């Protein structure tokens, strides 16, 4: 192949790869947005799917880990939620939103544990 033919082919391939790279970022960000939309519409399984899909592609997405943790918490999957919050904080330890969500999670978990403990004591007293 001569240089006159090769140059346009290489130029075309370069342009195509740049366009493909730029287009893939919005598609990835759409997973986060679709997950948020699903959660806002109480479609938790869809939200799980979207955020897990995002994590599979971008394991260092603190936002996806945080969002998935919130979803896990809402569905009572406490240990999974803890792992996701911790993953998000490991990626972005200074992220105020993630810190706040994790703190609220721990408070909710403590409250739930106390409620269970009190119910257990009440049941024991009835016996």
Image (cartoon, helix red, strand yellow):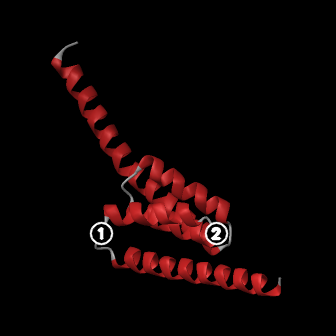
**Which image quadrant for residue 20?**
top left
Q: Are marks 1 and 2 in contact (CB under 8 Å)?
A: no
Q: Which residue is mark 2?
A: 76
Q: How many other residues sit within 10 Å of disc 2, few (<14), some (14-19) or many (≥20)?
A: few
Task: Say which quadrant the N terminus sits in.
Answer: top left
Location of residue 99 in the rendering, given as x and y in whole percent from the top left corner: 38, 76
Q: Which residue is mark 1?
A: 93
Q: Secondary structure at mark 1?
A: loop
Gap in Å between the C-alphas at discs 1 and 2? Answer: 24 Å
**Residue in the image at 78% along x and 82% along y:** 123
Viewer-proximal residue among 32 and 3: 32
**Residue in the image at 52% along x and 65% along y:** 81
| Sooner in the amino-acid sequence: mark 1 or mark 2 | 2
Tally the marks: 2
Q: How many other residues sit within 10 Å of disc 1, few (<14), some (14-19) or many (≥20)?
A: few
Q: Nearer the viewer, mark 1 or mark 2?
A: 2
Viewer-proximal residue among 12 and 126: 126
The label shown at residue 77 is none
- Would you place residue 70 above or below residue 121 in this image? above
**Which image quadrant for residue 47?**
bottom right
Q: Secondary structure at mark 2?
A: loop
Location of residue 118 in the rendering, given as x and y in whole percent from the top left corner: 67, 85
Viewer-proximal residue among 40 and 92: 92
């Amino acid at each position: 192949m001569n240089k006159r033919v090769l140059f346009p082919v290489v130029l075309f391939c370069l342009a195509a790869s740049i366009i493909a790279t730029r287009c893939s970022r919005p598609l990835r960000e759409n997973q986060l947005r679709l997950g948020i939309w699903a959660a806002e519409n109480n479609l938790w399984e869809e939200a799980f799917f979207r955020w897990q899909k995002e994590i599979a592609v971008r394991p260092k997405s603190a936002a996806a880990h945080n969002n998935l943790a919130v979803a896990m918490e809402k569905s009572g999957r406490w240990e999974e939620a803890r792992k996701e919050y911790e993953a998000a904080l490991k990626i972005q330890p200074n992220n105020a939103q993630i810190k706040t969500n994790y703190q609220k999670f721990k408070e909710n978990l403590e409250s739930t544990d106390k409620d269970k403990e009190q119910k257990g004591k009440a049941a024991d007293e009835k016996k």
